[in-house]
Amino acid sequence: MTPEEKKQEIKVVTLVGGVVNIILSAIKIFIGAAFHSSALIVDGLHSMSDVITDVFVLWVAKYSHDAPDAEHPYGHGRFETMGTVALGVILTATALVLAYENIIRLFIGDIHTIPAWPTLVGAGLSIILKEWVFRITLKIGKKVDSPMVIANAWHSRSDALSSIAVLLGIVFAMFGLPWMDTVMAIVVSIMIGKVGWDFLWTSIKELVDSSLEPEMIKEVRSEIMNVYGVKSMHNLRSRKMGDQAVLDVNIEVSRHITASEGHEIATYVSRNLIDKFDKIIDVTVHTDVEDDRVDGVEFSLEKRELLPLRDEVTKIVLQQIDLPEYLYMDIHYNDKQIVIDFIFSEESLENIEKHDLLREINTKCSNIIWLDKIQILIRL
């Protein structure tokens, strides 16, 4: 599914839910005020908060699936995370205010008014419509793999459950327990707060770069190891960005292949992961010829000791020995030491005893602590 198709799916289902929420909030607040049900008024305000979150969802969906650009090279998935944070804050704050007001009313107020039967109609209508909105929104949320839309769906489910609590409170009040209507208003407030906190906590974890789920990480590892040429892997890291994720990983390849072959293997790893998993949008692959972790520890911040690069290797080695003209030099970094291959033409070594030359080279270079050995190769 393309980002534009995702936007359209989210837009349609959210607009439907928004219209339902506007109608329900007006009905519940009006009936609750006219027929003496505090719980139904609170439930109406809950539906009004749904309208606000629907607006957030529409706004965030407009930007969160935009393609990467110069200012957001990893895409705009964090917009969705921030939208979910805002949704959680709104719900939690609403719950605290409503709970406070009804607790004061319960312990200080004079509660004698009995809700009239139309309040039952308002609560029943809310249960039916909000459950319907929950189901269609959850279906689309899973289809487009959007945590924000799924969160909005569960917000609708919390509204349906709160309407059930309201209905029970009204029934109890009609049977001579008028304070139960206020108690259920407090219960509804707690339910709203619980949903808001769940959204908030989940998004906060995402903002601090939480990894993908263990089951998906296991699938990713398997996919990487299925690429021809990958001997092993380590330091697989992932971080979520809304309904998307980015990865980086170290793969180990044979030390005897060329740099370009290692690069091509890394490209296959990256391409396969992006093609197989819709959630993964970017993969950085580091190519190693050995397990370069410090003491085998994943994600270690300790830095391993670096070996010299070609310019320094050439300078130090050629100060020790006087070589015939060679074609080129290969450097192999191997188990924290270096192996050097000097490649000669047959003509350059025509009058030289190869074994004597090699023995002389390794004797003179034996004091270089990072040097494992030097080899002489002839190109035919």
Image (spheres, helix red, strand yellow):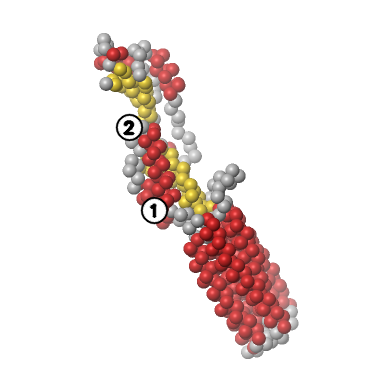
User: What amino acid is found at the position of numbered circle 1 in the picture?
Assistant: Glu
Instruction: Name the residue carrying label 2.
Output: 256
Residue 227: quadrant of the picture: top left
Residue assigned mark 1: 219
**Residue lying furthest top in this view?**
351
Q: Quadrant of the C terminus?
A: top left
Element under label 2? Answer: loop
Q: Give the x, y percent position of residue 355.
A: 25, 16
Q: Is residue 6 above or below residue 29?
A: above
Determine contact: label 1, label 2, CB under 8 Å: no
Question: Could you tell me how many numbered marks the image carries?
Answer: 2
Q: Position of residue 36 (x, y in %)?
A: 70, 83
> Badge 1: few (under 14), some or many (20 or more) residues near its Cα, within 10 Å?
few
The reply to whether residue 201 is in sight is no
Residue sitting at 56 percent across and 79 percent down? Answer: 128
Residue type at tag 2: His
68 or 298: nearer the viewer = 68
Q: Residue at x 33, y 43 (%)?
A: 228
Pick the front one: 70 or 341? 70
Q: Is residue 96 above or below residue 61?
A: below
Identity of the residue drawn at 40% across and 37% down: 263
x, y (%) of residue 337? 37, 27
For image coordinates 70% across by 84% down, the residue present is 35
